[in-house]
Amino acid sequence: MAPSSTPGKNQVFIGTFIHAKCLGELEYLHNTAVCVDASGTIVAIEPNCNQQKAVETLYARLGWSLDNVAITVARHELQFFFPGFIDTHVHASQYPNVGVFGKSTLLDWLNKYTFPMEASLSSLSKARRVYTRCIRRTLANGTTTAAYYATIDVKATNLLADLCYSMGQRAFIGRVCMDRLGPEYYLDESPDHAIAATRATVEHIRRIDSNFELVSPIITPRFAPACSSEMLTRLSELQKQTQLPMQTHISENDNEIKLVAELFPDGKSYADVYDTHGILNEKMILAHAVHLTEEEADLVAERKAKIAHCPCSNSALTSGVARVRWLLEKGIQVGLGTDMSGGYSPSILDAARQATIVSNHLIAPGGQLSCASQEERDKAKLSIEEVLYLATKGGAQVLGLADKIGTFEVGMQWDAQLIDLGRVPDDVAEDDYAIHGNLDIFGWETWDERIAKWVFNGDDRNTKKVWVRGRLVHE
């Protein structure tokens, strides 16, 4: 549906609210009212509050008049509000290739599928079709914030920013920079050209969203093999001048790591290449990090760079399994990414599902599953509560938005989704299993069990409404 809003209206949401305030623990707020002002900011959270109590006591305390409040009430006990999902790594320009891997691994896949598709989006009519569907699909799956890679084309990248802004999705828009490795038809002419093109996108986004409140530019070298040393240095200088966030890839694939060593023979490691060029800092989001060494992980932690964990893509392209627990224990902030089209799903809920599953099969560094002790394997496993944290507050930390989104707290912005788990009817004659998708709740489950069922069986059919900064952007 087209985004709608209630200009000038305050809003009250009543029902059950569930969020992950810390790693490994969900907080359940039942029979609660959350008040959101006209700017989309949470201004009050009232426990033991129904609609009548809100009208009688809450509005007066906030100075709100009844005729200027929009009310959303969870219709039954199996509906709840959850923070919007945060996708820390997604290629909007690759969306048409979702599910198309062939028999390729990373580098072959880039040349066969990725570069031709991205280059074709210089056609703005095609780009509009692709980007509109990508944004709608991610919003429908509850993604309120996404860190997007676009293409090297400035006009197509700017179009992605325009569409995110108009459709109401919080987004980071990256004009991709690359002056080698790709085909001749899809390369920056020079580092100077890449810097000028990146600045053009930055200024375009500044014109549509002057303070980058909803849509922000993000400096985007594709990855080290696709960038000359001069390119990385110039992008580092640009980042320091602008203080914009930055995103790239690291240690996704064994052959990629070997290629980095060949192209940057003076580099001690993949992470060191980024560090010596000045782009490994607290503004940097590194996707994948599957094969980081101990020294590299320590360097990433020291520089306070962040990691986007993309379990679906890592499996689909046979890249490996990232050691998320190990990264977290080193103090590295981690979020989840769909990495479409390396990943086949637009859903961060699915990424959370995949994160739990692949953590059960984590290999020891440099070896097979049998190389790890049972204690190490058990420790590596991620719980439901932990992956939901990574999908929300963890992602907010990675994108530098932990003071704005990811949890339900006073002062945070209302980026949220209304989830409907549905219920299997008592009367089998009235059972329409299509209504609530793949999820079957019978009513006797505990809340922990309901949430586990949602993570492993839920999909976009359970996502009934989505808001960003208080604006309804999907229903």
Image (spheres, rainbow, N blue to C red):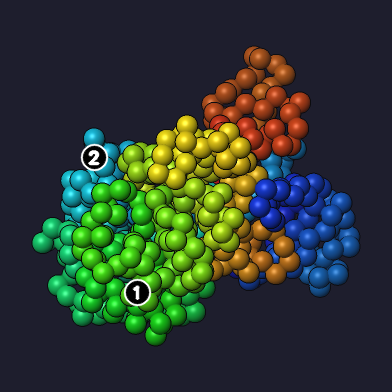
Question: For residue 174, which quarter of the picture?
Answer: bottom left
Question: For residue 175, which quarter of the picture?
Answer: bottom left
Tell me the distance, in whole angstroms, between the alpha carbons under discs 1 and 2.
31 Å
The answer to whether the residues at label 1 and label 2 have Cβ atoms under 8 Å apart is no
Which residue appears at 43% of the width and 76% of the height?
244
Left or right: residue 133 versus residue 390 is left
* Residue at disc 2, secondary structure: loop
Left or right: residue 379 versus residue 447 is left
The residue to which callout 2 is attached is: 104
Q: Amino acid at mark 1?
A: Thr
Residue 48 seen in the figure:
yes
Q: Amino acid at mark 2?
A: Ser
Q: Please, which residue is most extreme toward the top here?
A: 429
Where does residue 190 sit, x and y in percent of width and height?
17, 75
Q: Residues within 10 Å of mark 2 (few under 14, many from 20)?
A: some
Q: Please determine whether, in this image, residue 105 is positioned above or below residue 70.
A: above
Q: Please determine whether, in this image, residue 383 is positioned above or below residue 398.
A: above
First in sequence, mark 1 or 2: give its number.
2
Q: Please, which residue is most extreme toward the left here?
A: 184
* Residue 276: mark in rendering: 1
Which residue appears at 33% of the width and 65% of the height?
268
Where does residue 75 sit, x and y in percent of width and height?
72, 41
* Residue at disc 1, secondary structure: helix
Which residue appears at 61% of the width and 37% of the height?
375
* Residue 239: mark in rendering: none
Which residue appears at 66% of the width and 52% of the height?
23
